[in-house]
Each structure stands twice: as structure tokens, then as C-alpha cells.
Amino acid sequence: MSVIVTGGAGFIGSCMVRMLNDMGIDDILIVDHIASTEKWRNLVGKRYRAYIPRDEFLEKLSGLQERVSQVIHMGACSATTEKDFDFLYKNNFEFSKALWRFCAAEQIPFFMPAAQLPMETGNRALTTERRSAG
């Protein structure tokens, strides 16, 4: 049974993958958006079954339910300078809701660290801008 780690190519997510590897777990599906970044370097030396680009993941999710033992959700845009509300809403909020709903429906354990919560609700500057605009 696979462990899904969203954000698994980021610094903290790749540390989570390393910890799982140290526990003898290498049936890991890493979900991230590497694109033209250097995040691929964080995966060097890690053991995992597959990398799935974030943009393809939700459409593949329904075919994974019988093979997933848990989801560790580390994936979100954490850039405090990101001001694109539509991107943050889709990437951080809607993606997280879809993943949680899948896990709840399939009774798959879902872990999202408390440190992730501010990223999931948007950054403070963006929230302030939205209030003053309306």
C-alpha cells in the first residue's frame, strides 16, 4: 500500500520522504510541481515508487484508492509574496478540499501538519487586500 506525499519534492516534504525511507517505507507516491525549479535535487537519494505532477494528480486519484494507505499533505504554495488569489484558492484550498474529500470517502488517513494551515487559508497580506477592496 502506497503513502502519498503531496509537496514531496519541496524541502520539508522531501524530509518527510527521507523519514519514511528511514522507517523502511519506499512505496511512496510523490505529488508536486517541479517544472523548471531545482526541487528535483531534493529527491536525489530518496526511494519512492512514482512522481506524479500536481496538475495530473486529481484526475488519477480515483484509480488509486485501493492502493493508498495514507496521505501526507505537505503541498501548498508557501510563498508569502504570492498575490494571485485565484492561484492560491485553486492550489491551496480547492486542491486540499478535493484530497480530503477523497480520503474521507475512502476512509484513508489524511495528515496535514498544523504549520500548513496558514498556507491553506491564504496569506495575511492577500486577506487584507481582499477586505479593503470590497
Image (tube, rainbow, N blue to C red):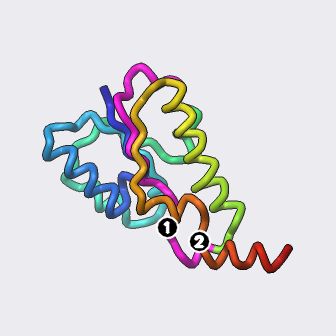
16 sits to left or right of 54: left
Residue 115's spot in the image, x, y percent? 41, 62
Q: Quadrant of residue 92?
A: bottom right
Across the whole image, how many numbered discs are drawn on residues? 2
**Residue depicted at 26% across the width and 57% down the height:** 15
Per the image, the residue denoted by label 1 is 78
Q: Earlier in the sequence, mark 1 or mark 2?
A: 1
Q: Quadrant of the C terminus?
A: bottom right
Residue 9's spot in the image, x, y percent? 36, 55
In the rendered image, the vertical position of residue 111 relative to residue 93, given as above or below: above
Tell me the mark number nearer the camera, choosing from 1 and 2.
Answer: 2
134 sits to left or right of 35: right
Q: Quadrant of the N terminus?
A: top left
**Residue depicted at 26% across the width and 49% down the height:** 17
Residue 52's spot in the image, x, y percent? 44, 42
Per the image, the residue denoted by label 2 is 123
Q: Quadrant of residue 27?
A: top left
**Dot 2 surroundings within 10 Å: few (below 14), some, or many (20 or more)?**
some
In the rendered image, the vertical position of residue 112 relative to residue 106, given as above or below: below
106 sits to left or right of 1: right
The extreme right residue here reads 134
**Residue depicted at 55% across the width and 58% down the height:** 120
What type is the residue that disc 1 sits on?
Ser
Task: Say which element carries label 1.
Answer: loop
The numbered mark at residue 127 is none
In the rendered image, the vertical position of residue 84 relative to residue 25, given as above or below: below
Magenta span:
62-82
C-alpha distance separating marks 1 and 2? 9 Å
Task: Say which element carries label 2.
Answer: loop
What type is the residue that disc 2 sits on?
Asn
The extreme top residue here reads 66
**Residue depicted at 33% across the width and 36% down the height:** 3
